[in-house]
Amino acid sequence: MATSALDYSAAGVPVRQDLRDTHVAMLEHLRTPGSWFTGAERLAIAAESRNALACPLCLERKASLSPEQPAGNHARASDLPEAVVEIAHRIRLDPQRLSKAWFDRVQKEGLDEGPFAELVGVVTFTAGLDYFCRSLGIPAFPLPDPAPGEPSGYRPEGLRSGIAWVSMLAPEDATGPEADLYEGAFVPNIARALSLVPAHVRVLMHESATHYVAMGKIPDPNERLDLDRLQMELVAARVSAMNECFY
Amino acid sequence: MLLRVSGESTGTAVDMQAVNGRVSTDGGVDHAAELVAFTEAVMGGDESTLRTTRAALRDVLSPEAFVDTCAVIGAFNVVDRIADSTGIPLDDMMAAMTTELRSDLDLSRFRSSSNTPAG
């Protein structure tokens, strides 16, 4: 996929090249077979991420006291298993009410933490691209065609459990194929969260460096974009408050 | 939540209530009212408000800074969902830097606060 494939013209402002390159890389990543899902399945998950916004069941649940009521069927954009659609919609539309009990139930119902982490990355990267486009005032990027191939089944060595719901790779355990995974002395938990799927971590690092600040430099208040750091942090904090995200 | 830390590094007194959407003045952050109004509109569902607040923000920011605002909004919609979906706790260093702030803003009201052990 070439950067020219993405149309920013409706924005009426120039979009810097490193952002364009990141968006191409993210879409290329979404269409590529991962550890547990094919490219076609990943794009179906991305489509479900978008579809959650118009799913009547999800909208009714979002307004309900219980995030899992009423019972019913999701509006679908794919033929993915119902459990996968349920998780994708929930993460996209109602992430603030996720809980450890919910995660445990997901595991018990058969979606192992590896595919779960892959699904989380696909749903959230799609959300990030969509929010960028919505902010800028341009249509969401079309999803690309899937790349051929099968999932690798790859799971890194050295994962540890007990810190988050999912197992994570600590910086000191990131060796061999994962030696390049983290950068800098400060490796926040958000950088480790998707380390069950190392390719997701690499994309997240790339995205953070161009859209915000390189992960390893987050504590340095002198790191900034054209927007000054105070303005960046105000916007970030307001987004997180509206998402009701403590992290 | 590095807003206060960033303010301290530049000697700026930041009105942290802007995080909860209460912006009476710019509170130490240039164009805070326009930034908060635009962010809220992007996160909301009213297209007319989104167009109005986008135009107002573009009136006060350079094109480059406006695009950066869009980028930060995109980035944190990724970060927040990953954090809430994987149950990661707040990093120790960040937790230590933001103890008072989290209390002031009553952030423990968010369900995901339970992922971070009380320190």
Image (spheres, rainbow, N blue to C red):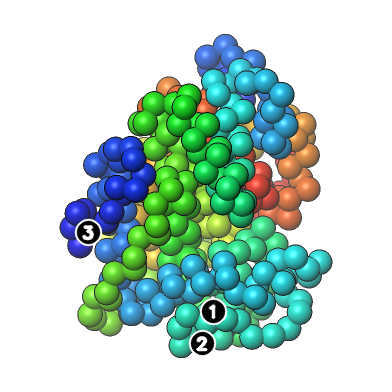
Q: Nearer the viewer, residue A42 or A145?
A: A145
Q: Above or below — where is A181 with respect to B91?
A: below
Q: Residue at x 62, y 28 (%)?
A: B33
Q: Nearer the viewer, residue B40 or A150?
A: B40
Give the spatial CA distance, label 2 vs label 3. 31 Å
Q: Position of residue A125 (x, y in %)?
A: 43, 59
Q: Residues within 10 Å of mark 3 (few under 14, many from 20)?
A: few
Question: Is residue B36 rendered to the left or right of residue A215?
Answer: right
User: As shown in the figure, which amino acid type bears the numbered disc 1?
Assistant: Val
Q: Position of residue A70 (x, y in %)?
A: 76, 79
User: As shown in the figure, which amino acid type bears the numbered disc 3?
Assistant: Ala
Give the spatial CA distance, label 1 vs label 2. 6 Å
Residue A100 in view: no
Tally of numbered tags: 3
User: As shown in the figure, which amino acid type bears the numbered disc 2?
Assistant: Pro
Q: Which residue is mark 1?
A: A85
- Residue that protrudes farthest toward the right in the picture: A65
Question: Which type of secondary structure does the marked residue at label 3 adopt?
Answer: helix
Q: Position of residue A40 (x, y in %)?
A: 33, 79
Q: Residue at x 78, y 48 (%)?
A: B109
Question: Which type of secondary structure does the marked residue at label 1 adopt?
Answer: helix
Q: Which residue is mark 2?
A: A81
Q: Which residue is mark 3?
A: A5
- Numbered disc 3: what chain? A
- The reply to whether discs 1 and 2 touch (Cβ–Cβ < 8 Å) is yes
